[in-house]
Amino acid sequence: MKRKLGKKNMILFVLFSILVLIIILLFAYAIYVAFSYDKTVYSLEEGSFLYDSSNHYISLSKQARVSQKWDKHYYLYLDSKSQKKTTDLGEDVVVYHEDDYKIQVIGKNYQIQPSGSVLYSDKLLEVAWNGSSSIYKLDDRKYLIVGKSISTEKKEIETGCYLLIEIDKSGNALLLNQEMNIKTLSTLTLITNEFSFDVANERLIVGDDVIDLKKINGSTNQYVEPQDKDEVDRNQNSQNTNSGSGNGNLGSSSSGTSMFDNGLFGGVYGNSGGAIVSGNTSKGDSVEIKKSANLTGITSSTSYIDVSYFISDPRNEYSSVYLMVEGVRYSQKFVLNKNNTSYRVRELAPNSSYTLRFCVSYLDSSHMLVEDVLNTLVIKTNRNSSTIVLNRVSGNRVYFTVHYDSSYAYDSANVNLYSDGEKVGSVAVSTAQALSEDGFTGYIDVSSGLGTEIVLRLEDCIYHDTSVQSSVFTKFVNR
């Protein structure tokens, strides 16, 4: 006599079967994802220029190869005499070579046609930069423009060949190529011979047609179009009339109403600050811009910060324009030249946060000195990428290789060897060799024998004639 399953047991059996099926499908999908990467090995020529996944530039002094791993990231492989170097390049790679008229694009990309149609590619793409301009969406808020001429509307930025654009969620952009590494702090439009690109809004403008690039594979952009500036002026005039005050609250002015320019130097519209300072003469409704100043870009390195700015002062009304830079045990004031557009703040510590304030001073209508902070932002310098690599241990001899960060190379330093906490040897590092492709290779003899815990540390470091601390070390257990 057959035994029948109860209704409750039948439901549990069905649910269990569904669960097993789901697990099998997920497992199959995981296997598919793990093995569905690009298995092509791409060769790069000596002299090629590209960026890694952290936007650090790489200029190849010898041939190299690029291939993708299961995590869908491409990696650069460069065999040196001392070790095999591997660098994460991210999910897409753009390669430039000054002797080639083609830009290489490795990885998935979407080429946007003037008609609005999209061409998808996930393999090697070679684009001639000396032909018609073209634009590609590489990733969320990341674009590539290729063309002979690329500039902003007012020619504050002019370049060619190619330009990588990474947009943050507030609409600001990082612009990268073989000539520049610029962070803009307000909205901008990039112009080519064939189209314009409204960066913050991710809009491609071809003639009278506007193509929304956010719709291509989605976007996490949170930029919101600012209020119409005519409406801003009307609101400001209304506030001034109601309050009986001659000073506007948006931006700083000598007298009267403020005006704003929503270009590269985007005034109050910039999400990271950047007020335009201006004044007016009372002649009907006309407004005369008397002076303006704005922080337009900022780029950090290991030991310095590059600041880009714009100053218009036709009547020499500013008493001074200056930067205040503050960090841990650091506070400096740097007076800026009004005729220049950039300044490098040097002698900074790696991997450290600094607060920058872009300031102006001028005399108000009562001839009192007014000091205004126009922009305030916090930026962190890059981590010191110097390394010590243990090559091998042979008997009581420890072999190692030192590579210096090219933007933070020590004047002198020692590799000190510690055995179970006791210093047992030291070797001076050659700066020239540590900056080379193969690095500085050396060894330390330990006559008394090696203990259990062995540590190699970069110590006694001198940078620009000043003693500095280094956190570069490597550790291993001797068994």
Image (cartoon, rainbow, N blue to C red):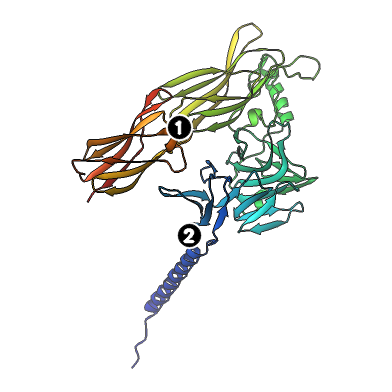
Asked if residue 384 shows in the view, the reply is no
In terms of depth relative to the viewer, which is nearer, 450 or 215?
450
Count neighbours of disc 1 (C-alpha within 10 A) and say few if under 14, some if 14 to 19, many if 20 or more: many
Viewport quadrant of the N terminus: bottom left
Q: Which residue is at a point 50% across and 28% down the rendered structure image? A: 304
**Residue 255 at x, y = what percent?**
68, 14
In terms of depth relative to the viewer, which is nearer, 87 or 399?
399
User: Label 1 near label 2: C-beta < 8 Å?
Assistant: no
**Residue 3 at x, y = what percent?**
34, 88
- Residue 15: name its quadrant: bottom left
CA distance separating discs 2 and 1: 34 Å
Looking at numbered disc 1 in the image, what kind of residue is underneath it?
Tyr
Asked if residue 420 shows in the view, the reply is yes
Specify the farthest residue to the bottom.
Answer: 1
In terms of depth relative to the viewer, which is nearer, 239 or 334?
334
**Helix, strand or loop at mark 2:** loop
- Residue 70: mark: 2
Q: Is residue 479 left or right of residue 360?
A: left
**Residue 412 at x, y = what percent?**
38, 29
- Residue 317: name its quadrant: top right
**Helix, strand or loop at mark 1:** loop
Query: In the rendered structure, which disc, 2 or 1, sits on the residue that comes first in sequence?
Result: 2
Up the image or down, 329 lies above or below 262; here it is above
Q: How many marks?
A: 2
Q: Is residue 289 left or right of residue 62?
A: right
**Residue 409 at x, y = what percent?**
44, 32
Up the image or down, 260 lies above or below 203; here it is above
Q: Which residue is at a point 20% across and 40% down the rendered structure image? A: 447
Q: Which residue is at a point 41% across and 30% down the rendered structure image? A: 410
